[in-house]
Image: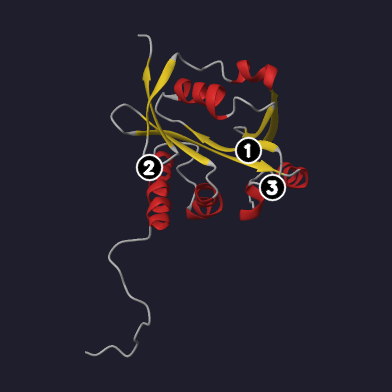
Amino acid sequence: MPLNYISHFRVLDTPADLTREIAEQCGYAAQLMSQNRSHHKLNLEYMRQVIEPAIRQRRIKFYFNEDGGIVGYVAWAWLAEEVAERVIAKGTFNLHESEWNEGNQLWIVDLLVPYGSLPYVMRHLRDKQFKDNAALHYLRRRGDNQVQVRTLRREMFSTFFRAAADLSPVQQGAHSGQLRFVREHW
């Protein structure tokens, strides 16, 4: 049966690099989210509103174990004061793509490390990713679904990151958002 619609675009069997990168990293996030009680009921809208913009803005880092298995991710944004006030008022990160990097307030948008690798991720965040930042902010949703705003100053980082372990990165992944870890001391 002949097609009545003729496309003026070529159809390819391989995606563009950016499309592949977004799909791959969304897959990492979905795998982690599906296996975590606090994230497993989040829907595709969450992926569209939080994970995809973080990937496009290069504001997400994925962590892998020595065997290449995904163990966690952190997503962050640099918010302007008025955007931060809106986030606090609404208790959610429903950001326009342009708002992810328009201010000087560092906000943790999402942190998910379900497989016991939190000490390694926290050390990397403390010593590498956010080492030059004077403060960071995040929302915490309590069991009763109330949202708390937390702000940590540099002098308090050691308390926040107290779970950090002695480890060192062994290999930077093919994408800047990938880092694998091994323990320095057993």
Applied colour scheme: secondary structure
Q: On screen, 165 above or below 174?
A: above
**Tag count:** 3
Relative to 109, say whether 9 is above or below: below
Residue at (28% x, 88% y) in the render: 3
Residue 173 is drawn in which quadrant?
Answer: top left
Q: What residue type is labelled 1?
A: Asn
Q: Is mark 2 on a helix, strand or loop?
A: helix
User: How far apart are the alpha carbons under marks 3 and 2?
Assistant: 30 Å
The mark that comes first in sequence, 1 or 3, is 3
Which label sits in the foreground, 3 or 2?
3
Write down the residue under mark 2: 31
Residue 6 lies left or right of residue 47; in this view the side is: left
Looking at the picture, how far across and down is residue 47, in whole percent? 49, 51
The residue under label 3 is 102
Viewer-closest of 164 and 149: 164
Residue 161 x/y as whole percent: 57, 19
**Where is residue 53 drawn, in percent x and y?**
54, 51
Residue depicted at x 48% and y 40%: 39
